[in-house]
Image (cartoon, rainbow, N blue to C red):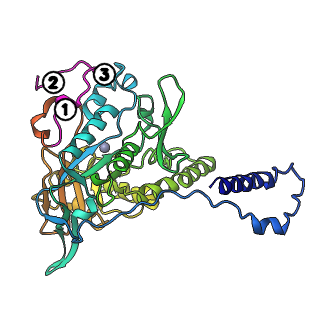
Amino acid sequence: MGRLLSVLMLLALLTACAAPAAPEKDTPLPPEPEAQEASLPPPAPPEPEPYEISDPTVEQEGFVPWTGTVEHLFFHPVIAYPELAFDGDGQANGLDDFMVTVDEYNRILESVYEKGYVLVDIHSVWSEKEGEDGPQMVRNTLYLPEGKKPLVLSYDDTNYYPYMLENGFAYKLIIGEDLKIASWGKDPEGNEVISRDLDAIPILDKFVEEHPDFSPFGAKGCLSLTGYEGILGYRTQTDTKEWDDAKEAGRQKEREAVVPIIEELRRTGWTFGSHTWGHIRLGDGNMTRIEADTQRWLDEVGSLVGETTVLFYPHGERPDGNDWTLTGPAFQYLQSQGFRIFCSVGVESFSFIKKDICAVICDRLHPDGTTLRHSRDRYLQFYDAKDIIDLEVRPEREVSWE
Ligand SMILES: [Zn+2]
């Protein structure tokens, strides 16, 4: 063993010595001796850890069918630095309403895990099947480990909008030195920080690494993306008011930079959906606007993340004002563009397969300041808000459960 080690060390030393120094400008590189090339091949580039994704709709031994409700929780990016978010500026109350902090998010994950939820991807829950009157959405049977309950997670506005950057959120996703997704941002003192503990996405990656039984099929969450300020912290958007070649060149660079992030997210169980390009209201029946926005999302976001069948309504606002008993022009148009799963926000994980068109509508629950403060009972199946909310760092506002 010791001998092998010393041989290896010698080899490593030889490799290090044999590496040619960077050539001076204009100095031709001397040809490398052939013998050396043959005996010391260049080291293979580092490989990311393998990651397995499987299909929960396939029966397997020891797994039992689940036909009950599939719970669906959604988050926004989480607050890494509460002192920046809750600094009393004009946005503090909005952030208190709609976001959770990193600590709260960690406690929520821990609680849903302990309560027996396991992650499934939203795409696994329904499928499109040929019916008598054309294609229809059908609810799939999921096969889960005995005693487990399915949970879908989605994450709205994972664009890392500029306003978030001053307010204590991550700036962008990157690939860290360990080849894993990390966030890049700045701490309150302005120091650059690369971390896997400060953003919802790498935090869930890490949680699944530490608790693989939380994701028996490798699923993570579905990222709901707008396009108007780029995606995942990369400024991939166009601007129709002011544009020139330099801006377009910058945009192309951002597009190139985000591709490996998207690939790594996909490889490790994340999927993507549309949140419309401009975070627009779908209820007002402005078809010109809805059509132009959809095409722009497909051009600027769909061209990067790929086709998607999932649409997350901005503001939770239903197309044509009603997507349940009505299939209006906006709904029909969005369905014609490939969307099949239409997600709103509600008081339970309600879902409804439409009969007159191939589509399913579903509501999501929203762990955030509003529900932590005022809807404790409704979320007890997932967690107890009393144990989650961090009133020390949040603004002094009411809670309904004391
Ligand atoms: Zn949104």
Q: Specify the amino acid type for callout 3.
A: Val
Residue located beneath label 2 in the image: 399
Identified at 27% across, 50% down, the residue is 153
Looking at the image, which is closer to me, 367 or 236? 367
| The N terminus, quarter of image | bottom right
**The magenta stretch spans which residues?**
382-402
**Label 3 crowd bin: few (<14), some (14–19), many (20+), radius 10 Å:** some
The residue at which mark 1 appears reads as 372
Q: Secondary structure at mark 3?
A: loop
Q: Disc 1 to disc 2, how far (Cα)?
A: 8 Å
> Nearest the camera: 320 or 158?
158
The disc label shown at residue 393, or none: 3
Q: Mark 2 or 3 closer to N-term?
A: 3
Residue 260 vs residue 335, the one in the foreground: 260
Q: Which of the two labelled residues, at mark 1 and mark 2, occupies the earlier sequence position?
A: 1
Disc 1/disc 3 C-alpha distance (Å): 14 Å
Q: Position of residue 184 (x, y in %)?
A: 50, 38
**Residue in view at x 12 percent, y 53 percent:** 350
Ligand 1 occupies quarter: top left
